[in-house]
C-alpha cells in the first residue's frame, strides 16, 4: 500500500513537470516577428512631432501579456501606451541643428505571468535628408569699384559664394544667376556653378556712376530653395575723353589798338568731359597764320580771354582773322580740344534788316551766325540732336526795344520749315535730325513782325551750312576676301594686280585709306581704291598668305573696320616653288658630300703615304728597298740580327759604318738610286763623296745609341731573335 502511494505521487510530479516544461517551450512572447534581433526605421527630417515613426514587430499583446518600455528616459521618441507604435517626441534634423540626426533606443519587452527577465530589443531610427535649407550668402551684399575702361570679359568679382546646409547632393548644390533688371546686362556669371562675375558691356562714367545688380543663389531641389542679394558697382572715372569747348565757334572784332577783345556769344571756356576727374585746363593759341598770331594776339592760360598785343598794320586790319584756340589738360597733354575764334575787321556802324552791327558789336551769339550785308549765316553739325539751339536772332529796330512782342516765322522754304523752328525770342532751333548727304545747306528767309502800335515787318536771309560728322563706320562688302595668284614667278613685271577689296563709308565726304598687317604684308600694297597689288615676290611663298586689311575713314574722330584676307597660290605655282626648294636642298647636299669626300680622300692618302714609308723602311712593304747611290744596301743593318750588327768580329767597324750609312740614307729620298742611263759620271762621283761624309758623321752619332739597343735586345732575346718593326723604326729615326 505504501508502495502504491509512493508511485502515485511520483507519477503526478512527473506529469506536472512535463506540462511546465512544455508551456515554457511554447512561450514566444517578446520575440520579433520574422526573426531578427533589432528593428530599423527610416524617418524624414521634416516629420512632425507626434507622428508615428513605425510599429514594433514584437509578438504579444502589449495590453494583455507583454509590457513595452524604453530604457532611455529622455528619448526623442516614445511608445504609445497599449500599442507597439513609436511616436516622435522631438523634432528631427539631418543636419543636427534643431534636433538629433539619428536615434538609437532600447525597447524592453517583459512577459506577464512569467518570472523571466525582459528581452532588450535595439531600435535604430535613421533620419533622411530633405530640401529644407535655402542657400546662405557669405559676405553679402557685395560692393566693388570698377574703372570705366575695363575690358569686356574681365573677371570683376571673384569669390561670390553661398552655402547650403543640406547634405551633399542636389539639395546642397548651389547655382548662381543674375536677375533681370535695369543693369543686369552689364555683368554675368562665368558658369552657373562658379561665383565669378565678368563684365559683359562697356561702362561709361558719364552715363552711369554706380548701379546695382540683383543676383540669386538656388539649390537643385524640386522645388528649389533660393536666396537673393545685391552687387553694388561703383564706376570710377578714367581719363578717356578730351576736353570740350562750350561752343564750336566764337566771334569777336579786331581792335584799332591794343586791348582785350570782346568774345561772343560768351567767354571762351572748355572743361574736361571726365566728370569724375575734372582736370585743370590751359588755353593756348595754335598759330594758323604763321608767327603773326603769336605776335599780334595772346590768350590768358586759365581765363580764356584774348588780348590784342599791338596795333595791326592797315593791310591786316581790313581783313578778318581766324584764330585756333587749344585747350589742353594739365595732367595729360595728349588730351586736348580745338575751337576757332573768328575776328571781324573793324568797321563803322551798319544797319541790317534785323539788327545793327556797331563798331564794337559782334556777331549773333550761337552756332556761328554772321550778319553780312543782310544775310545771316550759321553752321550746325550733322549729329546735332533735335532741340539744339542753332543760332539767335536780334532785332534792335523792332518792337522789342519798346517792350513790344515780335513774331518770327520762316517763309519761302517748306524744307526749312520742316527742319527748323524759330522761337519767340528769335532763337533758331533744330526740329529734326540732319542728313549731310541729303542736304548740305539750307537757305531760307525769316520774317519778323511786331504787333505794337507801329507795325513793322522785316525779312532777312538765313544760310545754315551743315557740317559733316563721322556718323558711319567704314564697311566691307564681304566679311572675308580670298584671292589666288596665277604664277608670280613668271610675272613679266611687278606690281601685279591680285584683286580688289571693296569698302564704302556712309559719310559722303570721308576718304578711305587701307593698311595691311601680317607676316607677308610687305609683299602687297592696297591703293585708295581698294586694289590689292603684289609689289614683291619670293621663292619660298607658302600655299596661303593670311593678311588683315584695315580701312580707316578721314572723319573726326576716325573710324575703322578690319577684314581678313587670304592670298593663295595656285597648284602650279605651289609645285614650282616646292620644286625649287627641293633643287636647292639637293644641290646643298651634293656640295656637302663633295667636301666630305675630298677631306676623307686627303686623310686616306696621307695615311697611306705614312704606312708605305714605314713598310719601305722596315722591309715589310712588299718590295725590296732600293739601293743607295754609293752602292751600300740601306736595309743591310735593319735586316741583320743584333749579334751580327754589333758582334766582336774583326769587321765590326765596317758594320757600324754601314749601319750609320743605311740609317741616314734611308730617310733621304734623294739617296735612292736613279736610272743610270744618261747620268753624268762626274756629278755622280761628287754626290757619292758627299754622301759618304754624311754617313760617317751619322754613324758616329748613332754608335752610342746602337750599343744601348744591342744590350737591351741581347737580354730580351738572347741574341737569337730579329728586331721588331717598331724597334727598327726607332733605331732608324
Image (cartoon, rainbow, N blue to C red):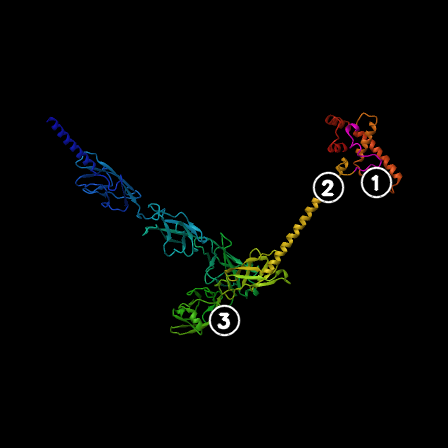
Residue at image mark 3: 373
Relative to 255, 49 lies left or right: left
Mark 3 surroundings within 10 Å by alpha-carbon count, few (fewer than 14), some (14 through 19), many (20 or more): few
**Residue at x 40%, y 56% (from the top left corner):** 185
Quadrant for residue 33, please give it.
top left
Please tell me whether mark 3 or mark 2 is closer to you in this view: 2
Q: Given contact means CB atoms under 8 Å apart, are the residues at marks 3 and 1 in contact?
A: no
> Distance between the Cα atoms at labels 2 and 1?
25 Å
Q: For this rendering, which residue is in front, 461 or 558? A: 558
Ranked by sequence position, the earlier of labels 2 and 1 is: 2
> Distance between the Cα atoms at labels 3 and 2?
110 Å
Residue 724, relative to residue 599: is it above or below? above
Q: Where is residue 397 drawn, in percent x and y?
A: 43, 71
**Residue at x 13%, y 30% (from the top left corner):** 8
Q: Given contact means CB atoms under 8 Å apart, are the residues at marks 3 and 2 in contact?
A: no
Relative to 214, 564 lies left or right: right
Ranked by sequence position, the earlier of labels 3 and 2 is: 3
Q: Where is residue 137 drawn, in percent x and y?
A: 35, 47
Please tell me whether mark 3 or mark 1 is closer to you in this view: 1
Residue 402, relative to residue 514: is it above or below? below
Residue 142 visible in the snapshot: yes
| Region rendered in magenta | 624-645
Residue 428, relative to residue 26: is it above or below? below
Instruction: Please identify the quadrant where the N terminus is shown.
Output: top left
Q: Where is residue 535 drawn, in percent x and y?
A: 61, 60
Residue at image mark 2: 606
Q: For this rendering, which residue is in front, 266 or 175? A: 175
Relative to 332, 678 lies left or right: right
Which SS type dominates the magenta stretch? loop
Residue at image mark 1: 674
Q: Secondary structure at mark 1?
A: loop
Residue 351 visible in the snapshot: no
Amino acid at each position: 500500500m505504501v508502495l502504491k502511494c509512493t508511485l502515485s505521487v511520483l507519477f503526478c510530479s512527473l506529469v506536472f513537470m512535463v506540462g511546465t516544461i512544455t508551456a515554457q517551450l511554447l512561450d514566444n512572447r517578446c520575440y520579433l516577428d520574422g526573426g531578427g534581433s533589432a528593428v530599423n526605421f527610416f524617418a524624414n527630417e521634416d516629420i512632425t512631432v507626434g507622428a508615428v515613426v513605425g510599429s514594433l514587430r514584437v509578438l504579444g499583446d502589449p495590453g494583455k501579456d507583454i509590457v513595452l518600455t524604453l530604457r532611455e528616459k529622455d528619448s526623442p521618441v516614445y511608445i504609445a501606451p497599449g500599442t507597439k507604435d513609436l511616436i516622435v517626441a522631438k523634432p528631427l534634423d539631418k543636419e543636427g541643428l534643431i534636433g538629433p540626426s539619428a536615434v538609437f533606443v532600447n525597447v524592453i519587452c517583459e512577459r506577464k505571468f512569467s518570472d523571466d527577465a525582459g528581452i532588450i530589443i535595439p531600435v535604430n531610427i535613421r533620419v533622411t535628408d530633405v530640401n529644407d535649407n535655402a542657400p546662405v550668402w557669405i559676405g553679402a551684399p557685395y560692393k566693388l569699384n570698377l574703372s570705366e575702361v575695363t575690358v569686356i570679359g574681365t573677371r570683376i568679382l571673384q569669390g561670390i559664394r553661398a552655402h547650403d546646409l543640406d547634405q551633399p547632393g542636389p539639395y546642397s548644390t548651389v547655382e548662381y544667376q543674375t536677375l533681370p533688371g535695369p543693369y543686369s546686362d552689364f555683368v554675368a556669371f562665368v558658369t552657373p556653378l562658379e561665383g565669378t562675375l565678368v563684365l559683359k558691356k562697356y561702362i561709361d562714367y558719364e552715363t552711369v556712376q554706380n548701379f546695382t545688380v540683383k543676383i540669386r543663389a538656388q539649390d537643385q531641389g524640386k522645388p528649389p530653395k533660393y536666396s537673393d542679394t545685391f552687387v553694388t558697382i561703383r564706376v570710377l572715372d578714367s581719363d578717356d575723353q578730351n576736353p570740350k569747348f562750350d561752343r564750336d565757334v566764337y566771334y569777336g572784332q579786331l581792335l584799332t589798338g591794343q586791348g582785350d577783345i570782346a568774345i561772343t556769344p560768351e567767354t571762351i571756356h572748355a572743361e574736361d568731359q571726365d566728370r569724375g576727374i575734372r582736370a585743370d585746363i590751359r588755353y593756348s593759341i595754335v598759330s594758323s597764320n604763321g608767327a603773326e598770331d603769336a605776335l599780334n594776339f595772346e590768350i590768358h592760360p586759365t581765363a580764356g580771354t584774348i588780348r590784342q598785343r599791338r596795333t595791326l598794320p592797315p593791310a591786316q586790319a581790313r581783313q578778318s582773322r581766324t584764330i585756333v584756340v587749344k585747350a589742353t589738360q594739365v595732367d595729360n597733354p595728349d588730351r586736348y580740344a580745338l575751337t576757332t575764334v573768328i575776328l571781324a575787321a573793324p568797321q563803322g556802324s551798319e544797319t541790317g534788316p534785323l539788327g545793327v552791327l556797331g563798331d564794337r558789336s559782334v556777331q549773333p551769339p550761337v552756332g556761328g551766325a554772321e550778319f553780312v550785308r543782310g544775310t545771316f549765316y550759321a553752321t550746325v553739325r550733322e549729329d546735332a540732336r533735335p532741340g539744339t539751339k542753332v543760332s539767335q536772332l536780334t532785332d534792335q529796330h523792332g518792337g522789342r526795344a519798346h517792350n513790344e512782342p515780335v513774331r518770327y516765322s520762316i517763309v519761302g522754304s517748306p524744307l526749312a520749315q520742316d527742319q527748323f523752328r524759330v522761337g519767340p525770342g528769335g532763337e533758331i532751333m533744330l526740329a529734326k535730325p540732319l542728313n549731310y548727304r541729303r542736304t548740305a545747306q539750307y537757305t531760307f528767309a525769316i520774317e519778323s513782325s511786331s504787333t505794337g502800335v507801329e507795325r513793322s515787318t522785316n525779312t532777312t536771309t538765313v544760310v545754315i551750312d551743315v557740317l559733316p560728322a563721322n556718323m558711319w563706320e567704314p564697311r566691307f562688302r564681304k566679311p572675308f576676301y580670298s584671292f589666288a595668284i596665277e604664277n608670280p614667278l613668271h610675272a613679266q613685271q611687278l606690281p601685279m594686280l591680285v584683286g580688289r577689296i571693296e569698302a564704302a563709308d556712309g559719310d559722303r565726304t570721308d576718304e578711305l585709306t587701307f593698311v595691311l598687317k601680317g607676316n607677308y604684308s610687305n609683299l602687297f600694297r592696297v591703293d585708295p581704291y581698294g586694289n590689292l597689288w603684289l609689289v614683291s615676290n619670293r621663292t619660298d611663298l607658302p600655299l596661303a598668305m593670311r593678311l588683315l586689311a584695315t580701312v580707316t575713314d578721314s572723319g573726326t574722330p576716325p573710324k575703322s573696320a578690319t577684314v581678313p584676307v587670304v592670298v593663295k597660290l595656285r597648284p602650279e605655282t605651289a609645285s614650282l616653288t616646292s620644286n625649287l626648294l627641293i633643287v636647292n636642298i639637293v644641290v646643298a647636299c651634293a656640295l656637302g658630300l663633295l667636301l666630305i669626300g675630298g677631306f676623307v680622300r686627303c686623310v686616306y692618302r696621307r695615311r697611306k703615304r705614312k704606312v708605305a714609308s714605314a713598310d719601305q723602311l722596315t722591309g715589310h712593304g712588299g718590295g725590296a728597298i732600293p739601293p743607295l747611290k754609293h752602292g751600300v744596301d740601306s736595309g743591310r743593318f735593319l735586316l741583320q740580327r743584333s749579334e751580327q750588327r754589333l758582334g766582336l768580329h774583326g769587321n765590326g767597324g765596317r758594320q757600324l759604318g754601314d749601319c750609320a750609312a743605311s740609317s741616314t740614307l734611308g730617310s733621304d729620298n734623294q739617296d735612292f738610286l736613279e736610272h743610270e742611263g744618261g747620268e753624268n759620271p762626274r756629278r755622280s762621283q761628287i754626290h757619292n763623296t758627299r754622301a759618304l761624309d754624311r754617313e760617317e758623321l751619322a754613324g758616329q752619332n748613332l754608335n752610342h745609341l746602337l750599343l744601348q739597343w744591342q744590350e737591351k735586345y741581347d737580354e730580351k732575346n738572347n741574341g737569337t731573335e730579329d728586331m721588331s718593326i717598331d724597334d727598327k723604326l726607332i733605331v732608324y729615326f
